[in-house]
Image (cartoon, grey):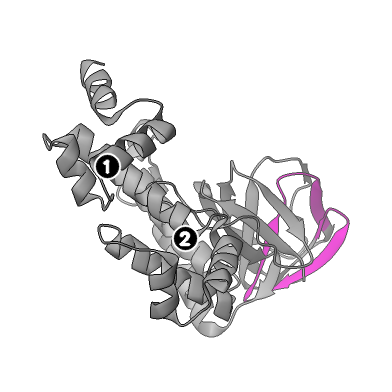
């Protein structure tokens, strides 16, 4: 099974959608390098499509995602009345098409930097009745954002901005229905539990000995599984969270440097100042003054 593996964020975004009714003898037109992912879902009938030299028979309940690059065309005219729905979306991030699910990168060790993960979707699949129903409902909702049923015409482009957020939410719901779900490994779940503890308790004293006691792992094992999931040690992640929280307090409150240091869990104002300068290039006081003047 071929799989589209998308690195997110950035997330895919909706372009447009529609439906088409083919009668016997009709052909899906040939196109090359269309620049968007073209998701085709057949409600009834069937299409005979070739995409990048791979042949597909897309029957009722099947969907196919055509690649933005390469060439696709009908290798055979439809033989029965066929209703299909289509949706175009784009992805500005990294992606590939592979014969297996691929994971690109680790989660972020910070509260303030987005984690990178993979959204993996089969290129071609038959949906069960429940997923088919949900997909059709979402497609109908998306189409309604583009078409004025009262005026019986497409909504002008200068008015479509009003529905941009709604269409993005609906697209992500649709991709969530189609994506391949894999259960997290035991090591991954353990690392996530440790990270959850750090994020919720960063104001308190935390060290490897405490984490070892709380999670019943040897300190060296904690470091290994945490680095495998997040790319840094638990203590480095703790310091990142504390420093970015300190930056937020410096820029958005009138708390003294000493108070910020205490609220963020640093052992002393002097240690906080050194760590902050090493990370941001300025002392906490100079950083606040510079950002407030700017």
Under tag 1, what secondary structure?
helix
Q: Which mark is residue 246?
A: 1
Please say whether residue 109 is visible from this viewpoint.
no
The picture places residue 143, in percent across and down from the top left corner, at: 44, 54
Residue 47, placed above or below residue 107? below
The picture places residue 118, in percent across and down from the top left corner, at: 59, 59
Looking at the rendering, the stretch of residues picked out in magenta corresponds to 50-74
| Residue 273 colored in magenta in the image | no
The foreground one among 59 and 272 is 272
Residue drawn at 53 percent across, 84 percent down: 129
Q: Crowding near pointer 1: few (<14 within 10 Å), some, many (20+)? A: many
Q: Which mark is residue 272?
A: none
The picture places residue 107, in percent across and down from the top left corner, at: 52, 58
Characterize the magenta stretch by its predominant secondary structure. Answer: strand
In what quadrant of the picture does the N terminus appear?
A: bottom right
Pointer 2: what residue? 234
**Image-quadrant location for residue 258:** top left
């Amino acid at each position: 099974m071929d799989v589209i593996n998308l690195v997110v964020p950035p997330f895919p975004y909706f372009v447009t959608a529609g439906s088409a009714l083919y009668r016997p003898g009709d052909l899906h037109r040939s196109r090359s390098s269309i620049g968007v992912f073209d998701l085709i879902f057949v409600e009834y009938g069937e299409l005979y499509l070739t995409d990048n030299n791979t042949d597909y028979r897309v029957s009722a309940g099947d969907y196919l995602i055509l690649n933005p690059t390469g060439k696709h065309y009908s290798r055979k005219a439809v033989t029965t009345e066929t209703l299909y729905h289509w949706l175009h979306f784009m992805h500005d991030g990294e992606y590939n098409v592979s014969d297996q699910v691929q994971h690109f990168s680790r989660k972020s060790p910070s509260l303030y930097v987005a984690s990178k993960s993979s959204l993996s979707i089969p290129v071609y699949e038959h949906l069960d009745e429940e997923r088919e129903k949900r997909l059709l409902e979402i497609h109908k909702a998306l189409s309604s954002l583009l078409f004025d049923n009262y005026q019986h015409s497409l909504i002008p482009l200068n008015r479509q901005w009003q529905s941009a957020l709604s269409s993005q939410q609906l697209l992500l719901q649709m991709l969530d229905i189609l994506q391949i779900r894999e259960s997290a490994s035991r090591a991954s779940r353990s690392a996530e539990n440790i990270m959850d503890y750090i994020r919720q308790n960063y104001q308190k004293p935390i060290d490897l000995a405490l984490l070892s006691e709380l999670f019943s792992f040897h300190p060296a094992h904690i470091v290994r599984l945490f680095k495998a999931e997040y790319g840094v040690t638990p203590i480095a992640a703790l310091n990142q969270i504390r420093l970015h929280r300190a930056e937020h307090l410096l820029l958005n409150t009138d708390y003294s440097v000493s108070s910020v240091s205490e609220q963020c869990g640093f052992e002393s104002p002097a240690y906080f100042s050194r760590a902050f300068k090493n990370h941001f290039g300025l002392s906490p006081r100079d950083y606040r003054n510079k950002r407030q003047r700017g």
